[in-house]
Image: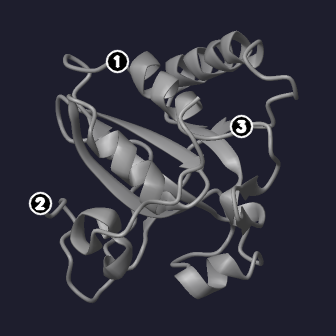
Amino acid sequence: MVGRFGLDKTQAPPVEPGDAPEGLALATFAAGCFWGVEEFLLAIPGVVDVVSGYTGGARAQPTYEQVCSGATGHAEAVLVTFDPTKVSYEHLLEEFWRHHDPTTPNRQGPDVGTQYRSAVFVHDAEQERLAKESLEQYQHRFQRPIVTEVSPATTFWPAEAYHQRYVERTGHGACHVANW
């Protein structure tokens, strides 16, 4: 299945925090390599689309190579379009915590760098409240402090087409760390 941004050779246009289609909502998560995050979120009933990309940095139209350099400040992230009548934001947060190690700063498994940080980019005050409450609730499951940042969503830059639906298209395993 091809997402709303398709698999052509061009980078899709940026998405702003308020750009959710009518009746749907957006969520943005960073939890290491975006391929694995995209894969587990796509499997959740009520998730309409997941797009891999870059957010949280200062450079407009960043490329994969620029983000990997660590110089842009962006995180590899996913933009989730979901139907809030079928899946709650709280459930998406549960899956986010369950599928990565939020106690390792700027790292997930073998992937190291600020682009692999753990972050929840919130689209409104309610998401911020729920993300902070969820972080506090999940802290007791870990011996080390959770380092996940909770920050306002900014422009989301979809990654190049070859990153979209990578696991689905190639059959290669994803790079998320673990199910907690």
User: Which residue is labeled 1 in the image?
Assistant: 88
Q: Amino acid at mark 1?
A: Ser
Q: Amino acid at mark 3?
A: Pro
Is 59 displayed left or right of 112 in the figure? left
User: Which residue is labeled 2 in the image?
Assistant: 1
Q: Residue furthest right?
A: 144
Q: Secondary structure at mark 1?
A: loop
Camera-side residue of 123 and 88:
88
Q: Is residue 155 visible?
A: no
Q: Residue at x 18, y 60 (%)?
A: 4
Colour approach in the figure: one colour
Displayed quadrant of residue 165: bottom left
**Coordinates of residue 157 in the picture (x, y in percent):** 46, 67
Dot 2, crowdedness within 10 Å: few (<14), some or many (≥20)?
few
Alpha-carbon distance for marks 1 and 3? 21 Å
User: Which residue is labeled 3 in the image?
Assistant: 102
**Coordinates of residue 128 in the picture (x, y in percent):** 60, 23
Which corner quadrant holds the N terminus? bottom left
